[in-house]
Amino acid sequence: MDDLAAVSSARRFGDGHVDVVLEGGPVGLPAVDRARSALAGTGRIKVPYLGGYEHFERRGDHDGRADDASRVVVFHWTMRTKIAE
């Protein structure tokens, strides 16, 4: 399943949330973790993965679709950090 298809099957949240796709980072990061909803205006997302966190930052507003109802915000991978022990 590609990332946009995963978003279409993701849960829908109420007003103030947008669908998000996380691009880049580890190849093994599951599609279910890459498609999510986040509060509108969120600039960074941190995802726990294999003893660390994958960090993603917002780079663009949407996937190019004209209507807001199908808006998908793209976040790109920036770095990985380890979980402190």
Image (cartoon, helix red, strand yellow):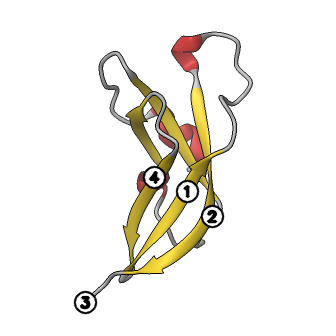
Tell me the residue that label 2 is attached to: 78
First along the sequence among labels 1 and 3: 1
Contact (CB < 8 A) between labels 4 and 1? yes
**Numbered disc 1: secondary structure:** strand
Residue with the most extreme top position = 67
- Looking at the rendered structure, the kind of residue marked 3 is Glu
Q: Position of residue 4 (x, y in %)?
A: 59, 39
First-in-chain label (3 vs 4):
4
Identified by mark 2, the residue type is Thr
Q: Which image quarter: residue 68? A: top right
User: Answer yes or no: do the residues labelled 3 and 2 have beta carbons within 8 Å?
Assistant: no
Q: Which residue position holds label 1?
A: 56
Question: What label does residue 85 carry, if any?
Answer: 3
Inspect the image, locate mark 1, and give the three-letter code of the amino acid beneath it: Phe
Instruction: Kindly report the distance in space between the C-alpha atoms of the residues bearing marks 1 and 3.
Output: 22 Å
Closer to the chain start, of discs 4 and 2, is 4
Please, is residue 56 above or below residue 53 in the view? above
Snapshot quadrant of residue 76: bottom right
Query: Badge 2: how crowded within 10 Å, few (<14), some, or many (20+)?
Result: some
Mark 4–mark 2 distance (CA, rounded to whole Å): 10 Å
Say which of 39 and 64 sits in front: 39
The residue that appears at 41% across and 53% down in the rendered structure is 32
Helix, strand or loop under label 4: strand
- Name the residue: 58% across, 22% down: 71
> What residue is disc 4 on?
45
